[in-house]
Amino acid sequence: MAVERTFSILKPDATERNLTGAINAMIEKAGLRIVAQKRVRITKEQAEQFYSVHKARPFFGELVEFMISAPVVVQVLEGEGAIAKYRDVMGATDPSKAADGTIRKTHAKSIGENSVHGSDSPENAAIEISQFFSGNEIVG
Ligand code: ATP
Ligand code: MG
């Protein structure tokens, strides 16, 4: 399997509860390398753009307000099959349906405040990484 990069966000419910270190430990234990990372407050425009695929959904407004409610940590993760691997480590969107040992099962508060984002395809990973990082900020 090829070495890939994926884009990750540690969401406001995670930064607010001081869980960035605990979640990073789970990421690294799974064999993913954090090759770029910064703590930022995203703007409303960035949040709307980032989740624009969901703009017709009833939870869109709530999702955008949540994403700007506190700082987030944006990351680039690298490893063999990193995109699918990180989705496995994250667990299902709804933490009550997530498998034991996953980040969302262990830490998420609800289906909305679910601690982490991970890209769902190579195309989206490339787009999302370029929205938050320039090439020289990623050090493998
Ligand atoms: P993400 O894109 O954040 O990695 P995901 O791919 O598991 O999560 P999506 O279906 O893309 O899930 O939903 C994007 C985000 O929207 C979810 O992570 C969650 O924060 C929020 N969300 C999804 N479904 C609901 C819902 N029914 N109610 C409230 N918020 C929701
Ligand atoms: Mg998604």
Image (tube, grey):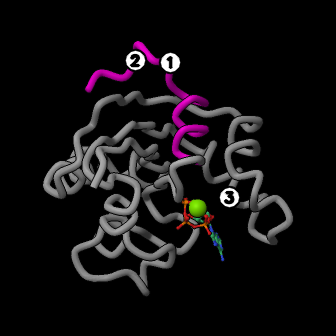
Residue extent of the magenta highlight:
124-140
Q: Position of residue 54 (x, y in %)?
A: 75, 62
CA gap, disc 3 to disc 1? 26 Å
- For disc 2, the marked residue is 137
Q: Residue furthest front?
A: 1
Would you place residue 81 above or below residue 58 in this image?
above
- For disc 3, the marked residue is 63
Q: Is residue 77 left or right of residue 62?
A: left
> Is there CB contact under 8 Å for labels 2 and 1?
yes
Q: Amino acid at mark 1?
A: Ser
Would you place residue 92 above or below residue 134 in this image?
below
Q: Position of residue 36 (x, y in %)?
A: 35, 28
Front residue of 60/36: it is 36
Q: Amino acid at mark 2?
A: Glu
**Ligand 1 is located in which of the four quadrants?**
bottom right
CA gap, disc 2 to disc 1? 6 Å
Q: Position of residue 19 (x, y in %)?
A: 29, 51
Q: Nearer the viewer, mark 3 or mark 1?
A: 1
Label 3 CB, ligand 1: below 8 Å? yes
Would you place residue 54 above or below residue 37 in this image?
below
Q: Amino acid at mark 3?
A: Leu
Q: Residue 29 occupies which quadrant of the picture?
A: bottom left
Residue 125 shown in magenta: yes
- Asked whether residue 125 appears in the rendered view, the answer is yes
